[in-house]
Every structure is written in C-alpha cells, then in structure tokens.
Amino acid sequence: MDMRPDPLIMMTTQAQAPTTTPTKVAAKNVNVYYGAKHALKDVSVDIPEKSVTAFIGPSGCGKSTFLRCINRMNDTVASCRVEGLIQIDGKDIYDPALDPVQLRARVGMVFQKPNPFPKSIYDNVAYGPRIHGLSKSKVELDQIVESSLRKASLWEEVKDRLNDSGTGLSGGQQQRLCIARTIAINPEIILMDEPCSALDPIATARIEELMEELRHNFTMIIVTHSMQQAARVSQRTAFFHLGILVETGSTSDIFTNPTDKRTQDYITGRFG
C-alpha cells in the first residue's frame, strides 16, 4: 500500500507560520520513564503560538506521551516520571508551586474518542465555566455556551435541542461538542490526540476546517497517524521515532525536504 502523501495535498498545505512567531511552549531535554521503560529521550522543541503543530510518527514512538506532558496528564500515571524542562510563556509547568488543575484550564485537551459527559449539550459546555467560576449569571453562562458552540461550528445544529443528551449526537458532532467544552474555559493551548481517528471522512473534514479557524486564537498541537492530515492542517511538523524527536520544521520542509533519512523513509512509506 502506497503511504506517500498525495502531492496535491502537499501543494495545498496551509501557509506556514512566520518564523518570527513567538514561542508558546518550549521543551528542553525532556525524558519520560514508565517504570524502567525509557519512553521519551532528550526531546527539545519550541512550539509557536497561534498555529497548528503536528506530531507524526509510527505507533508507540512517544508522540502522545509528549503531548500529555504539556498538560501534565502523565501525573495521573503512578509509574511515570518526567525529567527535563517544559515551559509555557517562559514558566516551568512542572514547578511544584504550580497547580496542575490551573494548568489544565490553560491547556485544554481533546481525546481520540469523543467523550461527552452523560449530561445535556448545554451542561457539557457549561461544566468548565461553572467549576472555574467564569460566569457571574445565567445570562453570562448562556453567552459562553452559545459562543463556544459557535466557535466549534455546532451551534446551528444543536441550538434547538440544548437540553438533549450530548451522547445522542453523531460521532463528529460529539467531537465538536468536546471541542466546544474545551474552549469554553478559554484555554491558551488546545491539545488534540488523534481527534479524527474515530470519525468518518466528512466529519474529519469538518474538524480539520475547525482547526484552521481555531488556530488564529489558540496554540494547537495535534497527534496524528495521518500524514495527509498533518500536511493539510499544520504549519509545523515534528517527527518522532522510537522515543526520539528526529526532526522538526515547517510542514512543507518536513514533507518535501526532510534532513534526516529516517524522516524520509517514514514519509515515503518505507516503515510505519
């Protein structure tokens, strides 16, 4: 099976983020261990703000592990140990004085499988603003819910059934609801771990269009197995292999002129 990206897709890759874009997330010599297993090895990378950065690589290469370091989701794994430095806006996110709950309010996450709460569509989106005290009245909360659903391109489809269960939506709608739930607390960064892998092509296209819209207001980092998706939606791409960050650069450079043979071999389908 030919795994090479479609040249037409590569030609239509989104315009690259300017090189002067400020860094939002900076990682230096990050190592992650699960017990004795060394899962990530000396990862260093700068991620620019208000753009889409894609992490690509074969299964088990460490890309999702690194993604989960950025909002300290790995804290919930007892055997996990993270070493090195990860900063957001120049501040160490593993500083013991930093509250992980507050960090996760700044760094939202959308998972591989849509996971709406077993609540109404309205309450799914209102949940975060309620617990973080972001609204002072029902009117304000209504405005946040509507605004978030509009940003997630879902408002027109659900505005007349906000009291219906979120779990009754289609898979693509559920994923957009999860995105609305994430942006309702106005995070600075949105992490997406294979957000389209459980969706059909039409729903995937809607999510990709949404990523392009959201990147103007949020720093977005996505993990994807689809090189075509990375080429379509991202401005920068990082290639992981066997726990090592092999190469990072503009998406067009990674796909058309990689500097490392391992990247070239993966892009052309020789492994992965």
Image (tube, rainbow, N blue to C red):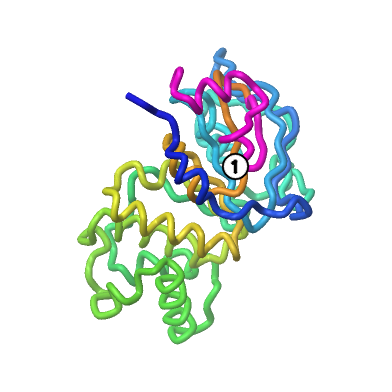
Residue drawn where x is 46% and y is 76% of the image: 147
Residue drawn where x is 51% and y is 36% of the image: 76
Q: Nearer the viewer, residue 143 or 240?
A: 240
| Percent x, y of residue 101 | 58, 52
What crowding class fits label 1: few (fewer than 14 Cα within 10 Å), some (14-19), or many (20 or more)?
many
Say which element carries label 1.
Answer: helix
| Percent x, y of residue 244 | 62, 22
Report if residue 163 lies within the magenta region: no
- Disc 1 designates what residue? 251
Q: Is residue 76 left or right of residue 41?
A: left
Above or below, comparing residue 186 to residue 39 in the picture:
below
Q: Nearer the viewer, residue 136 or 221?
A: 221
Q: Quadrant of residue 225?
A: top left
| Percent x, y of residue 91 | 77, 48
Regarding residue 259, the answer to whether it shows in the image is yes
Q: Nearer the viewer, residue 258 or 134?
A: 258
Regarding residue 96, the answer to whether it shows in the image is no
Q: Can you say which quadrant of the picture contains the N terminus?
A: top left
Going by the numbered disc 1, the residue's amino acid type is Thr
> Start and end of the magenta stretch?
245-272
Farthest residue, direction bottom? 139
Residue drawn where x is 55% and y is 53% of the image: 14
Q: Quadrant of residue 198?
A: top left
